[in-house]
Image: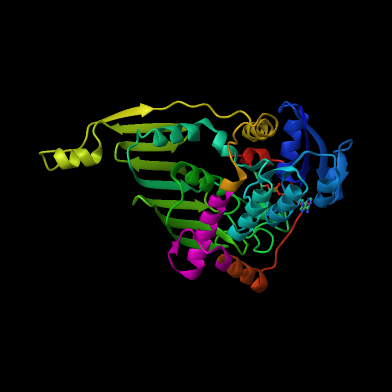
């Protein structure tokens, strides 16, 4: 195979965005040949691409080698499994599934077809700021991780946003709120930087700022295997909102905020200093370093390029689909903990959470409002 024949399933906000950079030729060796959406008006304008009003029909068409699944969350699993069983490579939009048990099903389907490339659209992993953070942490420069705080409350969304799709912010259509949708990207980065915590205690508020049934305001406490602790705060109802990631280790502190990454290094490891200092109020000397970084000019295209390179050349994936289960589990655990009023141990019981989610769906009484809304400002929402 020299070129990849690609189809997109779901031509909403992000599906159209993928189509626009692909059709502009920004991803060499990838040819967009087919598109699918259950709403026919959304796909008509993509002719002369082959168009399908049903994602499964595109999958069975024989026209594509790979698909991007950009539908609401629950279909990621069903369409992903159908595509893998058809022998297609799969790129799934985030979250890889609506809940952990579904992610396990999708991963099991991939395990049956290990030669197929299964990737997740976690484009923040291509952003230099997060790559630098990862390099510093994994290189040991921060020492042993002690604490993290991520206040990521600048995912502000309006009522018009929530009305722009019947599936949005419903248990049935989305499976969750801000955790599973907006800040799933941040949860992916968190697990990619620091691994999975062993304990999670979430405090979610449901429809606190919007007329929705799912969570739109969250504070969660995390505990990691080595004893590091964390606090994760997110909201779609805070303006102006904050995006501050602070990670403290025994050798210093990293702060990423306002497009600046600052590393305050301890000249001596904090524990070593504490154990050897002769004075009671002494502190390690510090050195402040600002770490410059650029923004990725086209993060989604970068991940798509990597997907193609993995299929055509065997390149390693930036975001393997199987890793997508971690952010889903973290989002589910924060929510489940809040619903139960208890701390959740990880790995969490995916079947128990699925049953609770099904109960929320069955008992939902919320009247969802849907309105024709312009999401023309969609691209401005990408976090970089
Ligand atoms: N990576 C990112 O930066 C990013 C940004 C936005 C959204 N997303 C993710 O992309 C997905 C879609 O979000 P969106 O904002 O584009 O939603 P959207 O509602 O604008 O688009 C979803 C589209 O899928 C279509 N659809 C539903 N079921 C289908 C099926 N069975 N076959 C074909 N089409 C079907 C709908 O008609 C709709 O047009 C979500 O999982 C979301 O979390 C990712």
In what quadrant of the picture does the C terminus appear? top right
Q: Is residue 60 above or below residue 335?
A: above
Which residue shows up at 44% across the image and 32% down it? 135
Q: Main secondary structure of the magenta part?
A: helix
Q: Left or right? Give the position of 196 relative to 29.
A: left
Residue 46 part of the magenta segment: no
* Image location of residue 20, percent across then percent down: 75, 34
In the image, residue 207 sits, relative to residue 120, either above or below, namely below
Q: Position of residue 321 (x, y in %)?
A: 62, 45
| Residue 144: image location, x then y, percent | 33, 41
Q: Is residue 378 shown to the viewer in this render?
A: yes
Residue 236 visible in the picture: no
Q: Is 140 above or below relative to 73?
A: above
Residue 341 part of the magenta segment: yes
Which residue is found at the position 69% from the left and 54% from the top? 77
Res 125 quadrant in image:
top right
The boundaries of the magenta stretch are 324-352
Which residue is most to the left?
Answer: 278
């Amino acid at each position: 195979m020299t070129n990849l024949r690609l189809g997109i399933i779901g031509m909403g906000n992000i599906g159209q965005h993928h189509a626009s950079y692909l059709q502009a030729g920004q991803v060499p060796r990838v040819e967009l040949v087919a598109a699918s959406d259950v709403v026919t008006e959304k796909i008509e304008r993509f002719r002369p691409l082959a168009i399908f009003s049903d994602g499964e029909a595109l999958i069975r068409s024989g026209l594509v080698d790979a698909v991007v699944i950009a539908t609401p969350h629950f279909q990621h699993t069903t369409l992903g499994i159908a595509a893998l069983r058809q022998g297609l490579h799969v790129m799934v939009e985030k979250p890889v599934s609506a809940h952990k048990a579904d992610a396990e099903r999708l991963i099991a389907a991939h395990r049956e077809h290990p030669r197929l490339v299964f990737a997740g659209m976690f484009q923040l992993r291509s952003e230099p700021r997060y790559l630098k953070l990862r390099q510093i942490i994994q290189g040991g420069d921060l020492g042993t991780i002690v604490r993290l705080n991520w206040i990521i409350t600048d995912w502000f969304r309006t009522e018009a946003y929530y009305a722009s799709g019947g599936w949005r912010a419903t248990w049935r259509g989305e499976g969750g709120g801000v955790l599973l949708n907006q800040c799933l990207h941040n949860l992916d980065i968190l697990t990619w930087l620091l691994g999975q915590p062993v304990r999670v205690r979430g405090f979610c508020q449901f429809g606190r700022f919007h007329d929705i049934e799912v969570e739109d305001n969250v504070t969660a406490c995390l505990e990691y295997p080595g004893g590091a602790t964390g606090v994760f705060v997110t909201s779609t109802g805070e303006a102006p909102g904050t995006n501050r990631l602070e990670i403290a280790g025994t050798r210093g502190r990293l702060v990423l905020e306002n497009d600046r990454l600052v590393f305050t290094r301890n000249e001596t490891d904090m524990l070593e200093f504490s154990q050897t200092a002769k004075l009671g109020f002494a502190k390690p000397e510090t050195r402040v370093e600002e770490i410059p970084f650029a923004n990725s000019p086209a993060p989604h295209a970068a991940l798509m390029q990597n997907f193609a390179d993995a299929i055509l050349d065997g390149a390693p994936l930036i975001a393997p689909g199987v890793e997508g289960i971690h952010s889903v589990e973290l989002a589910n655990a924060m929510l489940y903990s809040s619903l139960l009023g208890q701390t959740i141990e990880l790995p969490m019981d995916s079947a128990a959470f699925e049953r609770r989610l099904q109960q929320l769906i069955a008992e939902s009484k919320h009247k969802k409002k849907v309105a024709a809304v312009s999401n023309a400002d969609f691209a401005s929402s990408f976090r970089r």
